[in-house]
Amino acid sequence: MATLFILSHAPHADHYDARTLELARAGDGVLFIEDAVYAAGDRPTALDAALAAARSRGVTCYALQADVEARGVRPQCATVDYAGWVKLLEQYDRAVH
């Protein structure tokens, strides 16, 4: 059962986000929204190691385009608009925020 994990907190603000990334398995996805898009950017964050490990397990990462643009982040993963977010919700068996 594939899960879409949705993270919304800044990488330094919520230590549970690293644990969430540890739970993600091959076939799962992670969508970064709001301040969490900083973790999907090209600058170092507290989630870098957990995100790299998740990617190595086959987890796909996405960032919400509107939040990326609003924060001036250069994403290092696929971006989706709001319609793309809805498609992700349809694609995965469940979503966890």
Image: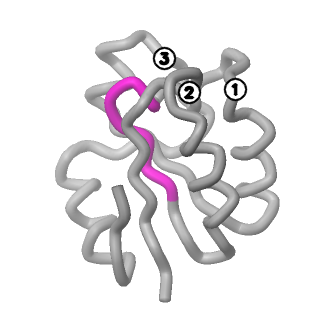
> Mark 2 and 1 residues: CB-CB less than 8 Å, in contact?
yes
**Quadrant housing residue 8:** top left
Query: Magenta residues?
Result: 30-36
| Camera-side mark, 3 or 2 | 2
Instruction: Identify the mark at residue 11; answer none if there is no mark.
Output: 2
Residue drawn at point x = 55 percent, y = 71 percent:
28
Badge 2 marks a residue whose secondary structure is: loop
Three-letter code, disc 2: Pro
Residue 68 point in image, percent of width and height: 39, 24
Q: Which mark is residue 73?
A: 3
The quadrant of the picture occupied by the C terminus is bottom left
**Residue 47: image x %, image y %?**
68, 34
Residue 35 shown in magenta? yes
Question: In this orientation, which residue lies closer to the viewer: 93 or 72?
Answer: 93
Please name which of the two marks, 3 or 1, marks the residue nearer to the observer: 1
Residue 46, numbered circle: 1
Q: Amino acid at mark 1?
A: Ala
Upstream in sequence: badge 3 or badge 1:
1
